[in-house]
Amino acid sequence: MDRLPWAGIHWKIIVGLGTVWILDGLEVTLIGSLAARLVEPGSGLPITEGQIGLAASIYILGACLGALFFGRLTDKWGRKKLFMLTLVVYCVATFATAFAVEPWMFFVCRFFTGAGIGGEYAAINSAVDELIPAHYRGRVDILINGTYWLGATFGSFYSLFFLNTAMFAENLGWRFALGVGALLGVVIIFVRRHVPESPRWLFIHGREDEAEEIVERIEKQIRKETDEPLEKVGRDERITIHQRASIPFSEIAKTAFGKYPRRAILCLALFIGQAFLYNGITFNLGTLYQNYYGIDAGSAPLLMALFAIVNFLGALILGPLFDKVGRKKMIASTYLGSALVTVPLYFVFLNETGGLWGFVVLLSLTFFIATAGASAAYLTVSEIFPMETRALAIAFFYAIGTGVGGIIGPLLFGNFIESGDRGLVGLGFLLAAGIMAVGGIAEIFLGVDAEGKSLEDIAAPITAQQPGEENATT
């Protein structure tokens, strides 16, 4: 799979699997945009501003626990079963949210919506990296993660349409918005039916005939498209595997965190850094615009849409460099670069230099650089651990990073913004920059040069035959 040229099957994988981040971006932005309507007396849901914040935390908790639960199942049951199951969970929970009439119903639905999205992260990143050729893996992974911001852009405009009281009643518009989001997920389920299971996963779990059939079908399609013979696999690229139907959790944990402790530290630094910066600032950006720049609720979604577009462009433009320049150089550069740009952002905000647009320009530059680095955190953890642990490793570091940075960051920034003290908010920017810089420094000393390499060369499977062992399959 790693040696294959780019072909139509790879576009199908991008379309079928990359949509999870669009849904997550849509979800987070949509609920943020709908919040003002939900707390109004005529919304049909008796919920307060504080309970909206609690719902956001419950969504994150669901995503963290869902990632861990479904991540383990992804390694055990297979990529395809789980990226179908987690999307079904998301669709059902989102649709059910539209019928919430009490806060507790809203909370339960938000928990399971988050669980579906968190499970998607583990299943999708595993499948993408195991199906995409090695020389394209970095840019594809970063681009797919970056599509979160397409969902956020769509969510900003989408919410304006459904919140228009000339078209929808106050107690119905937000429900229709959630219902349509769930229907979008149903459409994606049908698209995903054509994405194959990972041949790597099948082979390691004793289903080599199915794996061979999938690879032969893909190779046949590519030969037909390119009308050229494919590069042959050299004998030095072959590994021998002890096939097993299941692998104990204890063995997975021992290999992932006992054999690769430096890689574990690296992933923690990268995930906590990006989660603190992104969740801390983006979750509170609307109130920051309103409290410090006088932007009303009707204009804030337009600024959020601009912010989202800049983030997507960062992933789109910088992504290819992760394959061409290299992982370590680009990850360190994006983490440290975004941290450095935050320093002038601090002074622009503190002194109100350039007004709103002076702040927006520097904020956009910071996140244009940061977005590719944040996406590379997912790419890193999905590449540098053995295949049998891949989904669970993604889930673990996502859960820890989101749990630490994704909860502390928003709470801290929220309190700073509420204080009305520009100095405290500026301190929040510098703190976020410092934590991002730690991730960049960790990459310099602990990073792995994974560009262009087979996943098995970066981290040998747990089931790979050791010298002197017998009864394995090549």
Image (spheres, rainbow, N blue to C red):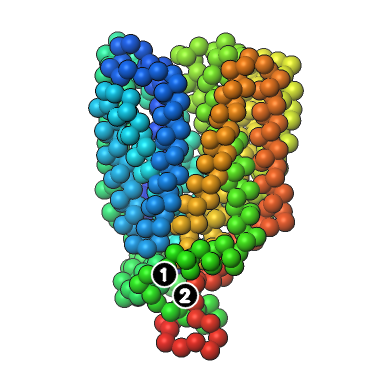
Q: Secondary structure at mark 2?
A: loop
Q: In this view of the protein, which residue sits in the foreground, 277 or 101?
A: 101
Q: Which mark, by number, is residue 463?
A: 2
**Dot 2 crowding, Cα within 10 Å, few <14, some 14–19, many 20+:** some
The C terminus sits in image quarter: bottom left
Taking the spot 31% from the left edge, 76% from the top edge, the residue there is 209
Q: Which mark, by number, is residue 2?
A: none
Q: Is residue 217 left or right of residue 151?
A: left
Does residue 132 appear in the picture of this structure? no
> Are the residues flagged by discs 2 and 1 in contact, CB closer than 8 Å?
yes
Question: Which amino acid lies under the numbered mark 2 shown in the image of this protein?
Answer: Thr
Residue 233 in the image, given as x and y percentages of width and height = 49, 77
Residue 69 in the image, given as x and y percentages of width and height = 39, 52
Residue denoted by label 1: 247
Taking the spot 52% from the left edge, 41% from the top edge, the residue there is 403
Q: Is residue 252 above or below residue 330?
A: below
Q: In this view of the protein, which residue sits in the foreground, 269 or 12?
A: 269
Does residue 406 appear in the picture of this structure? yes
Q: Secondary structure at mark 1?
A: loop
**Dot 1 crowding, Cα within 10 Å, few <14, some 14–19, many 20+:** some
